[in-house]
Amino acid sequence: MTELTLFNTLGRKLEPFQPLVPGEARVYICGPTVYNEVHIGNLRTFLFGDLLRRSLQHLGLRVIQVMNLTDVDDKTIQGAHKAGLSLPEYTGPFIKTFLRDLDTLHMERVEHFPKATEHIPEMIAIIETLIANGHAYETDGSVFFKIASDPTYGSLSGFDLDQARQGERVASDEYGKEDVRDFGLWKAVKPGEPSWESPWGPGRPGWHIECSAMAVTYLGEAFDLHGGGLDLVFPHHENEDAQSTAAGHPFASTWLHHGLVTAKGGEKMSKSLGNSVTVAEALQTIPPVVLRYALGAAHYRSTIEWSDLVVAEAAAAYARLETFVRNAAGSPDAPEPEGVWEAFAAAMNDDLGVSRALGVIHDAVREGNTALAAGTPVGGVFRVVRRMLGVLGLDPADWASTEGGALTP
């Protein structure tokens, strides 16, 4: 057991993190829908996943992490159709730019980046199980999860089933489901759409079943951590959890959700609202390391209202760290200051308390600068500062080995 405590959305409380397998942490972080370039709101999800990964590793855990690539859904299908391309032709370039952005921001590559289109048989198998045990039904070539069959539905998000209308038929484009609360597991093919064969006829998977199938395939029926943005708690993660547990999979022990990045005035940042800033656009004026600092300096559960001031403060803060590391690099060796690493570790073990951890780092840097000015050796401060910044992916010495923000081969 580690000393790490995390805020579990399931139960809404801080809990000690206890890996299911000693010495190992299995993690699923929701990846991008690859129909466009990633914007900085999306980027926070991936940076959060990287912070979680690095934090688990600094505790000595072996991390097995999955980040899915949603390459079949309404948005990818519509985009491919409009562009006159097949799904792989359309989504392929966006997958490449996504991976490029991860490298540019110094995020470690996770163990698995599964594509939804490559796991259709696994999805069909789960759906067949749900039908067999009475949790799903087929109608007109589509399959729906029967929410009324799950007495625990809503436990993750707090959704109240009584607030939803029950038992009514809905519009024809909902494929004839019987209850407005039910959600699609398999969608019957529409003219012009890509499709796969299934026991219920040609069609394609629903969004929620994709993640359940890929998580179980790579992490097992029970795994440690599932994370994503706060906007995914309902319906996506609620539905994932419901269909997975109904199929007999214990699924995730701990659910983690980070706050959103909003535009000016607190409006949600999204492509559909036209107020998003792509990573490529941001990097035209913001150095990659500053972008990482700006999106990672606040506690992961807080909201970030994106602004020039946020960027300016991040740039100034990182410059202080970078200047110290550069100036202290040649200083004679000395013992590490007592209690600094312990204070940093305590902050990070308290629900990934980055803000407090950065305070520890900046305090150490101030003391180091005072010692440098006095001609006192600061080799120990230099080492512990780099060690702490390494956990946050912000070690200036690592960034100095790159050119233009891209990782060297």
Image: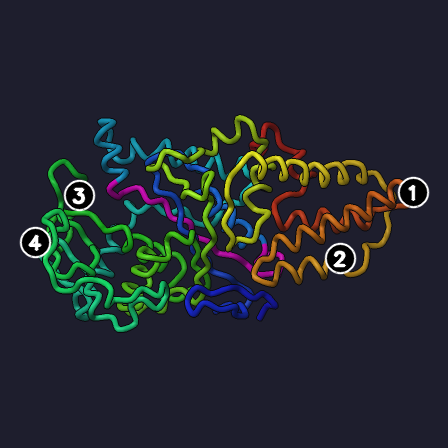
Query: Of all residues shown, which one is farthest toward the left?
Result: 140
Q: Amino acid at mark 3?
A: Ser
The Cα atoms of the two marked residues, 2 and 4, are separated by 63 Å
Q: Nearer the viewer, mark 3 or mark 2?
A: 2
Quick one: quadrant of the N terminus? bottom right
Secondary structure of the residue carrying tag 3 is loop
Comparing 328 with 320, the one in front is: 320
Q: Which residue is mark 3?
A: 195
Evaluate if marks 3 and 2 touch, with contact meaning CB atoms under 8 Å apart.
no
Q: Is tag 4's residue or tag 3's residue first in the polypeptide sequence?
A: 4
Query: Of all residues shown, which one is farthest toward the bottom?
Result: 151
Left or right of 391 on screen, residue 275: left
Q: Is tag 3's residue or tag 1's residue first in the polypeptide sequence?
A: 3
Q: Which mark is residue 374?
A: 1
- Residue density around tag 1, few if under 14, some if 14–19, many if 20 or more, within 10 Å: few
- Residue density around tag 2, few if under 14, some if 14–19, many if 20 or more, within 10 Å: some
Q: Residue at x 70, y 50 (%)?
A: 387
Q: Which residue is mark 4?
A: 140
Q: Residue at x 47, y 38 (%)?
A: 264
Secondary structure of the residue carrying tag 4 is loop
The stretch drawn in magenta includes residue 60: yes
Q: Amino acid at mark 4?
A: Asp
As drawn, 203 above or below 18: above
Q: How is the image coloured?
A: rainbow
The Cα atoms of the two marked residues, 1 and 2, are separated by 21 Å
Secondary structure of the residue carrying tag 1 is loop
On the image, the x and y values in percent for residue 38 come to 42, 37
Q: Which residue is mark 2?
A: 340
